[in-house]
Amino acid sequence: MKKLFILAAVFMFCVTLVPGAYAQPLKVGALMSMTGPLKEFGPNILNGATLAAKQMTDAGFAIDVISQDTQTSAIPGVNAAKKLVQIDKVPAIVGAISSGITVPVAESVTIPNGVVLISPSATSPLISVLPADQGKDFLFRTCPSDALQGVVLGQLAATFNKTASVIYVNNPYGQGLAEQFKKSFEFRHGKVLAMVPIDEKAAESYTAELKKALAGKPDRLCAFTYPEHAKIYLKEAIEFFHYKHFLFCDGTKSEDIIKALGAKNVEGQMGTVAGSPTGPALDLFNADYKAAYGKLPPLPYITNAYDAMAVIGLAAYATNLKGLPLTGANIRDNLRVVADPPGETILPGQFKKAFDLLKEGKKINYDGAGGSVDFDKNGDVQTPIDIWKYSNGKIVTVKSVWPIPKI
């Protein structure tokens, strides 16, 4: 009996010296909009993150994704984040989808608690310079700032129009995008006639807001909101104001809008979104997503969520190999180690290869499905901006813009 006890003790001691051996799964939170104005996007973006976690688990590093619904609203989003951090004890979170949720979550929950937050789709320029994160480096994103998208939107509008009005969701996302669009459009000699904010919570009608936006008879009405808002005010613009010259963005790249308005009413109308560069990385992701879920919808930021989970998992694995605890700070310190040059390129799904290289002490550079994940000092990445349009009841890409003009 004494020998058995000694052998067991020696075995357990040896296990603790082997990084990753018999370790519990890494818990990663996911803050998703499963209800509210962004409910069309949430399930598919979550699928992207979950796919990366499953592939890493299959490759030998178990990840347990714990998802919470933010309801596309700041207060429920903050409460959901508190649950993930205080009860589930996650060291890292993918999300939130909206800048209006990501900012308060970062300020009041993740940064004070030393938890990594990587949003796949929060595009507000404010995130780059959020005061609460300066010097702490816990806030990242795998999508580009609207400092880029707004420039391309202004350039696109100025190609066809002299005047425009904007309806925008009154949060950091809508405000940042609207302001950058105005600056870019007017730099190109256009004129913004009205900037009309609407609340994050979808209303039953927007006729009062439409009267303000359309009073000057703009050449184009910019829909810088979420699908659940846009389905209502765009339909009212068509039915009550006989107006249907719209400009869309990432937040209104929506199959539900086609269904609500009818394909004929949006035919040929264009918008912008963060682009995913074509090539082997995107091809691998597309094939794996379709194999897992049967269909890849033309909705934004699914690839970016995959990349956010991928870099968290790779950084956690690198942390584990160093014999360090899987804290938010240690994962943060390894994000750029696994996702920036130099190093052998790792594409989506190649996680077994990545783990083997890391175990051999070699450097890796994850090249994402949504583009390069080379985080700068602000936790930002840069990708092309795609111009897309509604065509024959579908959403199709027109072209990719890169490099992005400065204004």
Image (tube, rainbow, N blue to C red):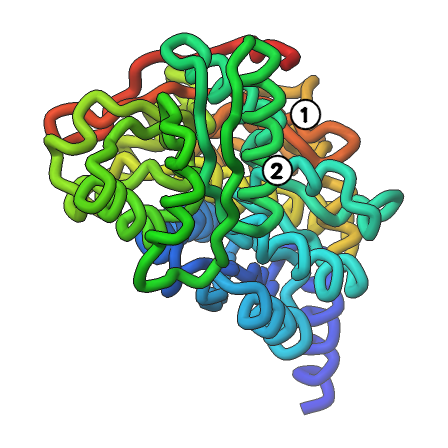
> Of residues 208 and 297, which is closer to you in this image?
208
Image location (x, y in percent) of residue 10: 74, 71
Q: Dot 1 corresponds to which residue? A: 340
Q: Residue at x 12, y 40 (%)?
A: 262
Q: Dot 2 corresponds to which residue? A: 176
Quadrant for residue 71, please give it: bottom left
The answer to whether 267 appears left or right of 38 in the picture is left
Residue 304 against residue 330 in the figure, above or below: above
**Disc 1/disc 2 C-alpha distance (Å):** 28 Å
> In which quadrant of the rendered image does the C terminus lie?
top right
Quadrant for residue 81, please give it: bottom right
Residue 266: give its label: none
Instruction: Tell me, yes or no, whether the two marked residues, 1 and 2, touch with CB atoms within 8 Å.
Output: no
Q: Residue at x 55, y 62 (%)?
A: 29
Residue 107 against residue 266 in the figure, above or below: below
Label 2 neighbour load within 10 Å: few <14, some 14-19, many 20+: many
Mark 1, secondary structure of its residue: loop
Quadrant for residue 7, please give it: bottom right
